Amino acid sequence: MLVRSRQSLLIACLAALAGSAAHARPIQGADSVTIRAEYGAGNSREFQVFYAPRHFWSLGVGHMEIETDAANSHEVTYARLNFLAKRWNFEDAQANVFVWGGVGSAYFGAITIRPDAPDQPGSGHDHGPLPGDVAVRYRAFREAAWNAGGQIDYETLRFYSSLRTDTHRADTFEHRVDTLQVGFSPYKHEVDSLSTWLIVSARRYTGHALDGDELALLLRFFRKNAWLEAGATTNGEVRAMAMFSF
């Protein structure tokens, strides 16, 4: 009787974790579709749709837009494959390692070149270094790009942590985001109940479009297949994300 009780408790804990943590990850479950949209601090937007034929891999498409000012805009449209590399199921916790990669097309509305930068596509000549602080803007163009990244996470019914890196790269463009998140829930949630989390999110942007660090405080809610996250950075910029799976 005690063995059955412990087995029932283990199954309940794992079910609760699967029902909660799955929404924070690029693969939801076998034969599922996930739609995700994110708004980042006034300078980035991303939309993704993934289908998972099996519980350990999914594929789909995404579109990302980055703006640094009124004159500079970058867009990347890509197809991507996600893979669950490793999963650990503990009695009251779960941990995962995900990796992904894909290819796509990068669009540049305008690009500013430093005075000492070499010539870029679309200029027509190579005049060598430019004097002073002259800024050269080239016309819009497209080029092939690729995407790669990974995530490792660990979660109990009251604690959540994840480390994630994601890179988009082309010949004349690179955009990388490294994110560390730590979260706490004020109560243990059940599978069918509303789950609430307070998340501290630290990000580092590296690349031609964005470069710098960001710290945000987020409030996360999810229930069954719906997920909503919203908050603000220490600079007062809004960050928000919504995800649905079915």
Image (spheres, helix red, strand yellow):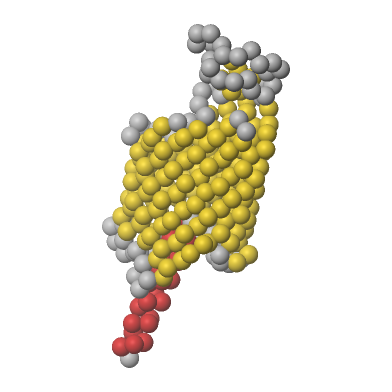
Q: Residue furthest front?
A: 128
Q: Looking at the picture, does residue 8 appear above or below residue 18?
A: below
Task: Identify the residue at the far top of this view.
Answer: 132
Residue 170 sits above or below residue 47 on the image: above
Which residue occupies the extreme bottom position in the image? 1
- The part of the image, by quadrant, that contains residue 122 is top right
Give x and y (percent) for residue 85.
51, 62
Q: Does residue 87 show up?
A: yes
Residue at left 37%, top 49%?
A: 181
Where residue 42 appears, x then y in whole percent? 47, 32
Vertical order, 237 against 86 (above or below): above
Tell me where residue 21 appears, x and y as whole percent: 43, 60
Give the quadrant of the N terminus: bottom left
Which quarter of the figure is the C terminus placed in? bottom right
Q: Is residue 55 left or right of residue 14?
A: right
Observer able to see residue 77? no
Write down the quadrant of residue 238 in the picture: top left
User: Residue 233's image quarter?
Assistant: top left
Residue at 39% from the left image edge and 74% from the top image edge:
12
Residue 60 in the image: x percent, y percent?
Answer: 63, 52
Q: Closest to the observer: 169 or 57? A: 169
Q: In the rendered view, would you say 14 is above or below 134?
A: below
- Residue drawn at x 53%, y 55% as measured from the top left: 99
Q: Residue at horizontal 56%, vertical 14%?
A: 129
Q: Residue furthest right?
A: 124
